[in-house]
Amino acid sequence: MFDWPTFFRQYGIQYVREGANVAQGHININCPMCLGADPSHHMGINVSNGKWGCWRDPSHRGNRPHRLIISLIHCTFGEAKGLVGDIETKEAFDIGYITNLLYDPIRENNSDQTLNFPIDFIPIKNSGSTKKFYNYLRHKRGFGEHTDEVIEKHKLTCCLHGNWENRIIFPIYLKNKLVTWTGRTLGSDSTRYKTLSRNDSPPALERITDTIFNYDSISETGGETLVICEGPFDALKIDSLSFGARSRVPGSLDGIRGEPGTRATCLFGTGLYSKQKILLSSLDKAFGSIYILLDREMYGVAMRHASSLILLDVKVAMLPENIEDPGDMSPTEVANFILTL
Ligand SMILES: [Zn+2]
């Protein structure tokens, strides 16, 4: 039987075990086949026989997990088979992966559509009404003297009102084109990261899980080492505090590793999606070695991702014992961590 709860946790898909739409012996999710129209867990999965079905649309149902997996994570049928864990499908998985390599998301992205920031996304300054965002980056997130550089290099903005109120906005670019953004709340909002979707107005041009953070910059510079992280703050921390080898920022790791240095990206979660694999595969020649660094309890997931990036020879990195979250590391801890790679 396919282990749906583990799959949902690995891919950051929210599910419920009880509630208005949850029948006995089922777990429920928002139906991915309803394409954003289901806000309240209408897709039920029977945990004892694996059958799944949607309350909203009787055509959204099945017995085998593959079609639901494909709807959820936009993978190929071959990859879904690989996930389902059928040993006989190893070959199908590899063929599915290579077929995917023929599809180029960057070329696809050259449509005429554009995405622009709302007018209420404003610069983060060390004064006035946006100083709380500056202080959050400088002190809470520990960017210290690198704060201005991080804001500038990653075009971070913030929002004081409306849908994105009280969030730091991370714009996501692909081939110099804004394709989506995600906003990290400063407050205790249960949605820590809120991300522009394809159903929003304006719509995102790409699903965030079809992108990787910082792609344009890391593909341009390349480097000795690439670290694939979970969240944008993890990537920002490792990237900004080791990028000094190029930007000559005081207190950087310049001289420790020399050029080219360590760069970082993130997957916006613990899942690794088809298009992300393609983007990462395109960095094959740009880096000497590639590591994946997830939270400690996701070690097994990191191992699986590493083995699914068959062409890249990805190694799994471990955080030092005393550190829970890569985004919490001090500059010295980042330096020491990078020296272990
Ligand atoms: Zn549905």
Image (tube, helix red, strand yellow):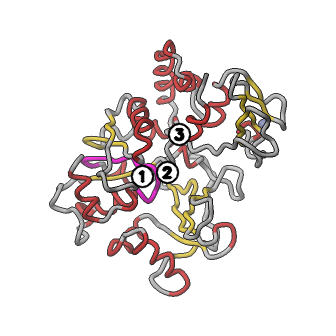
User: Closer to the camera: disc 3 or disc 2?
Assistant: 3
Magenta residue check for 285 = no
What's the residue at 28%, 65% (across, down)? 331
- Tell me whether circle 2 and circle 1 mark residues in contact (CB < 8 Å): yes
Label disc, if present, on residue 174 of the rendered structure: 2
Residue 75 at what x, y percent from top left?
57, 31
Q: How far is the residue under mark 2 from the one under mark 1?
A: 6 Å
Q: Secondary structure at mark 3?
A: helix
Which residue bears the numbered disc 3? Answer: 10
| Quarter where residue 187 is shown | bottom right
Q: Is 13 left, or right, of 214 in this rendering?
A: right
Residue 90 at what x, y percent from top left?
47, 17
User: Closer to the camera: disc 3 or disc 1?
Assistant: 3
**Stretch in magenta:** 223-234
Q: Secondary structure at mark 2?
A: strand
Which residue bears the numbered disc 1? Answer: 216
Query: Label 3 sits on what residue type?
Result: Gln
Is label 1 within 8 A of ligand 1 (CB to nearest ligand atom)?
no
